[in-house]
Amino acid sequence: MPYDAMYKLALIAAIARNNAIGLENKLIYWLPNDLKRFKELTTGHTIIMGSNTFRSLPKGALPNRRNIVLSRKENAFPGAETFKSLEEALANCNNEEIVYIIGGETLYRAAMPYADILCLTEINDTPENADAFFPEFKRFEWEIIQDERHEKDEKHNFEYSFVTYLRRKSPRR
């Protein structure tokens, strides 16, 4: 990755044109190439998620990653560490690693002010139903460092792009 050594906090999500990401604690889109990209980017790194996102994972904690769940109430997330706040979790991460925020909506909103990178799969669709959304962000504050477009095909029902944004000026610098 061109940003591995310099930047620390990344938000990763698949978003529709209206920023929709989920419905009833499930992803709206199931795109094999998006899942492959997610695995490639996050393997070997720390991932932070909310408790509902952890519960939505079909097999629990994701392998070959340090799984952190944020929860003020529970502590029972097999294969994951638990912290009460994003700040507490980040304080327990290595300053040299990229940490990925993987959802849900509330955590994305809390982490956006601290984010250095947005790793988005932008899907050319607007779903009729959604109850979870990626936060709006001021695009002028971000530089696109990757934009890889894909047509729909037999495995992907929508056109989509892998777009990586780098914050023009990090709030922590």
Image (cartoon, rainbow, N blue to C red):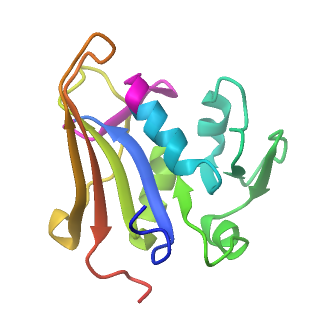
Residue ID at (48%, 50%): 106
Residue ID at (42%, 68%): 115
Residue ID at (24%, 15%): 153
Q: Position of residue 28 (x, y in %)?
A: 38, 24
Find residue 72 and report its image quarter: bottom right
For the image, the number of numbered tags is: 0
Q: Is residue 134 above or below residue 31?
A: below
Q: Nearer the viewer, residue 103 or 39?
A: 39
Find residue 39 and report its image quarter: top right
Is residue 103 visible in the rendered image? The answer is no
Q: Give the farthest residue toward the front.
A: 2
- Is residue 91 left or right of 49 when viewed as pictured? right
Q: Position of residue 168 (x, y in %)?
A: 25, 77
Q: Position of residue 22 (x, y in %)?
A: 41, 30
Q: Give the farthest residue toward the bottom.
A: 173
Is residue 108 visible in the rendered image? The answer is yes
Q: Is residue 154 above or below residue 25?
A: above
Residue ID at (66%, 42%): 51
Q: Is residue 87 above or below residue 171?
A: above
Q: Is residue 118 above or below residue 17?
A: below
Question: Where the N terminus falls, by quadrant?
Answer: bottom left
Q: Nearer the viewer, residue 159 or 132?
A: 159
Q: Nearer the viewer, residue 86 or 47?
A: 47
Q: Is residue 21 magenta?
A: yes
Q: Position of residue 40 (x, y in %)?
A: 51, 44
Q: Nearer the viewer, residue 27 or 168?
A: 168
Q: Give the farthest residue toward the top.
A: 154
Q: Which residues are magenta?
A: 17-33
Question: Where the C terminus falls, by quadrant?
Answer: bottom left
